[in-house]
Amino acid sequence: MSEPLGGLSGLLLALKLRSRRQRLLLRAWRKRGQLAAVADRTAGIAPGDILCFLCLRNEARRLPHFLAHHRALGVRHFLVVDNASTDGSGALLADQPDVSLWQTGASYKASRFGMDWLTWLMLRHGHGHWCLTLDADELLIYPYWQTRPLPALTDWLDTQGRVSFGALTVDMYPEGPVSQGQVAPQDDPLTHLAWFDAGNYQVQVQPRMRNLWIQGGARARAFFADTPRRAPTLNKTPLVRWHWRYAYVNSTHALLPPRLNEVYATDGGEITSGVILHTKFLPGITERSAEEKARGEHFADAAQYAAYYDRLTADPILHTPASTRYTGWRQMEALGLMSRGGWI
């Protein structure tokens, strides 16, 4: 494992990263004008409330369960950017008493895939709060999540002097073709997406910002077998006690300042971590993939990912004889995909 740079090189790197963080914050401040408030209920946010930030487009099928799951975990307020939804997502969200909603028709790609907008909202409303940043197709779990809500976890993190919490993204998928089946908006998607890849994960440490780089799982196996370096990054740091000076660099895969990325042990032990259950492969994915390929808003070089979208549109079967059926967080811990660490 690479050690952080020291001496003059370390000082120069620290100055470069500080300058980058300041540019990201300035960029977010400039993009604030792209957001139009639809339902601003942030005056009701109380000290100590756990907040959830997300940017979405056309997620009405997922939102009822997403909101219910994270409310049950202990999220008290959701701050949402709706990027020109056409499926009723905006109206659904505007009716929720614990949701503040902004809308924009601006480019998702040009806003660093929504991170400029969310950075502004976190800068404005997240300071001092534990903030959870997710996509609408992601469900956070962690050790004891069914009996210990997020405030119990964040209180424990506070006692440990930790201000960030890491999680591994695990792609969930059905047993048959990804287009088949019926899942109602209120249904738990995991009753349909009951399978995942238990192995095939590769881990590196990026020395510049000290963040992990994890690849593998079902998407790497099924769509990037010939170009594994292009496979999606699976490590995230979704839960942070936010300060207005912080900024995500690349989705929630890395933050500045770099110390926030140290969500892993370097002494041979383990640090408490979670899993993000990725529910991308619900029925309707084939139509959405065709649409997103045409829009070209989800990758910096969309042409490089044309084959990925084409494979999804072709209605693949991701399940194999080596697939593992999901049974719960203890299974994830036993497989080494999450850890209790010192939280007993």
Image (tube, helix red, strand yellow):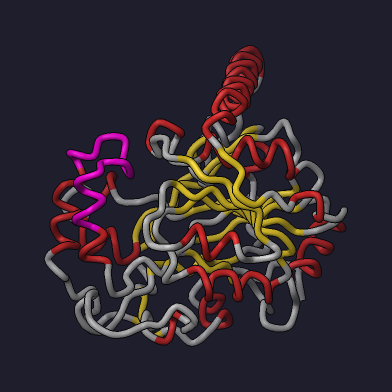
For the point 19% across and 75% down, which residue is it?
Answer: 317
For the point 62% across and 33% down, which residue is it?
Answer: 256
Q: Main secondary structure of the magenta part?
A: helix
For the point 41% across and 69% down, which residue is it?
Answer: 279
The relative height of residue 20 versus residue 129 in the rendered view (above or below) is above
Residue 169 visible here: no
Is residue 80 covered in magenta?
no
How far across and how far down the image is residue 182, in percent?
A: 31, 85
Is 341 on the left or on the right of 9, as rendered?
Answer: right
For the point 85% across and 55% down, which residue is it?
Answer: 46
Q: Nearer the viewer, residue 144 or 52?
A: 52
How far across and how far down the image is residue 103, in percent?
A: 52, 45
How far across and how far down the image is residue 82, in percent?
A: 49, 50
The relative height of residue 118 versus residue 98 in the rendered view (above or below) is above
Is residue 291 covered in magenta?
yes
Which stretch appears magenta?
289-304
Residue 310 visible here: yes
How far across and how far down the image is residue 216, in percent?
A: 34, 59
The relative height of residue 340 versus residue 261 in the rendered view (above or below) is below
Q: Nearer the viewer, residue 269 or 236?
A: 236
User: The C terminus appears in which quarter of the rendering?
Assistant: bottom right
Residue 121 occupies quadrant = top right
